[in-house]
Image: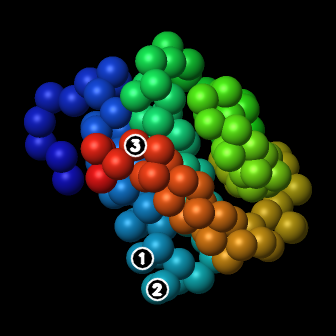
Amino acid sequence: MLRKQTSEKNPADWFAFAEDRLKCADSLWKHEGLTAAGIEILQEASERYLKGYLVAKGWELVRTHDLERLVKEAAIFSPEFAQFRKFALELTEDFFAQHYPGEDTTETGQNYVVLRKEAGEMIQLLQRELPNYF
């Protein structure tokens, strides 16, 4: 856990928060399997990695949980991010379906293994784009 003053303008802080959440999502998956919390934590990790990337590129922070929007913004800086639009849409939908009661969750998380793999691929792209942070 980070024990310091953090800044939303510091990409390293975003990446540290993202890494922590990704480790938690992986641990939860390993020990509990598919859970609503695991979906939420994977989404939060992906969101923070993307926001860290965008902040590093000079982007003005937008408070959103919409990964598709963030992937579109990232694709402005590197067109390779466009390949993650489907991933971003599905994980965002899964996130909101289980975030508050009232949604149909019968198919939520059905592609978790694929989503986790694609999150890893997106993170690898981000690391190639910003090696000085990793």
Provide the residue designation for mark 3. 130
Q: Tell me which numbered mark, 3 or 1, is placed earlier along the sequence.
A: 1
Marks 3/2: CA distance?
32 Å
- Residue 83: percent from the left, percent from the top? 76, 51
Residue appearing at x 72%, y 51% in the figure: 84
At label 2, the amino acid type is His
Identify the secondary structure beneath mark 1.
helix
Left or right of 102 on screen, residue 18: left
- Residue 78: percent from the left, percent from the top? 62, 36
Residue 46 visible in the snapshot: yes
Marks 3/1: CA distance?
26 Å
At label 3, the amino acid type is Leu
Left or right of 126 on screen, residue 98: right
At label 1, the amino acid type is Ser
Left or right of 91 on screen, residue 128: left
- The residue carrying pointer 2 sits among few (fewer than 14), some (14 to 19) or many (20 or more) residues within 10 Å by Cα, namely few
Residue appearing at x 62%, y 71% in the figure: 117
Marks 2/1: CA distance?
6 Å
Colour approach in the figure: rainbow
Residue appearing at x 86%, y 67% in the figure: 107
In-front residue for pair 134/47:
134
Dot label at residue 126: none
Identify the secondary structure beneath mark 2.
helix
Provide the residue designation for mark 2. 31
Provide the residue designation for mark 1. 27
Q: Is residue 75 above or below residue 30?
A: above
